[in-house]
Amino acid sequence: MRRYSTLVPEVGLILGSGLGSVAASVEAALELAYSAIPHFPQSTVAGHAGRLVLGRWHGKTVLVFQGRLHYYEGYSLSEVTLPVRVAAALGAKFLFLTNAAGSLRADWQAGELMLIKDHLNFLGDNPLRGLDDARFGPRFPDLVNAYDADLRRYAREAALAMGLALREGTYAAVSGPSYETPAEAAFLRLAGADAVGMSTVPEVIVARQVGLRVLAVSCLTNVLAGAAGGHTVHEQVVQRAAAAADDLARLLAAVVARL
Ligand code: HPA
């Protein structure tokens, strides 16, 4: 990276399913396919471009990972979280994440955005497992305020100013790639989750280990059965996320501009 550009990113951005177009308005100084980066895992999911974009966006230098890596693709959590370490190593201080998620709440609508305030890790794995090297940060990072309260306030204020409905809740991460059974959805709700998805939590854990301040927003693409919803159809998930991408981009842009 440093060989290609002297720009130092302030914000890393990892974009979820159907949400890659958030990067469209970045004034790109450098675009690199993941396949051109040695040792970098490849994005295997449709709807994930698999490209890194470095450039200026709303007055800040951003490093956008357009195409996320997921545990269900078969990658280890160390591979899944490599982008976070790359962003931090290049100088980023903030990490913004987006994802598509299923709503576990009957009173929330598909298409709405949810600010993540906390998480439940149901992956059965942790990206810090096996890693004991002080150069990477503490072995036992604290996860209180992992979803930075100030950044969440900026997002809430921006949403209010834009007239955009913004929910706030707890995100449960599961491995997928199958969607939840009605019993699993009911269990996750009972456990305290408002939304469920297959990403984000590993990246947040690593971000906190290396000291990045985190903002994460889910696009609620469906309401799960068990929470008054019906079948979950992948094409609909991607399509609903794409439909919300513009709102999400405006929201993140407003927060980036305030940093
Ligand atoms: N479950 C898990 N992951 C998801 C969902 C869901 O219902 N929707 C989008 N990502």
Image (spheres, rainbow, N blue to C red):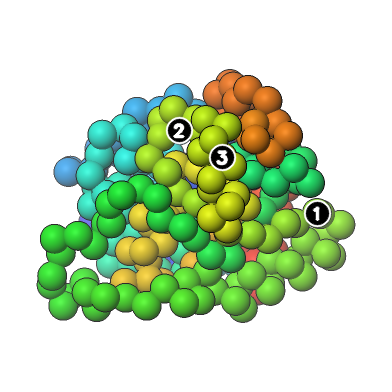
Whether the residue under disc 3 has CB within 8 Å of ligand 1 = yes
Residue count near mark 3 (Cα–Cα under 10 Å), binned few <14, some 14–19, many ≥20? many
Is residue 243 depicted above or below 38 in this figure? above
Answer whether labels 1 and 3 touch (C-beta < 8 Å). no
Answer whether labels 3 and 2 touch (C-beta < 8 Å). no
x, y percent for residue 23 = 55, 45
* CA separation in Å, label 3 and label 2: 26 Å
Residue at the (60%, 76%) spot, across then down:
149
Which dot, 1 or 2, sits closer to the camera? 1
Q: Work out which quarter of the rendered image holds the C terminus and state it.
A: bottom right
x, y percent for residue 131 = 15, 64
Seen from the viewer's position, the closer of residues 191 and 146 is: 191
Which residue in the structure is indicated by mark 2?
Answer: 48
Label 2 element class = loop
Residue at the (42%, 43%) spot, across then down:
174
Label 3 element class = helix
User: Quick check: 188 left or right of 243?
Assistant: left
User: Quick check: 183 left or right of 78?
Assistant: right
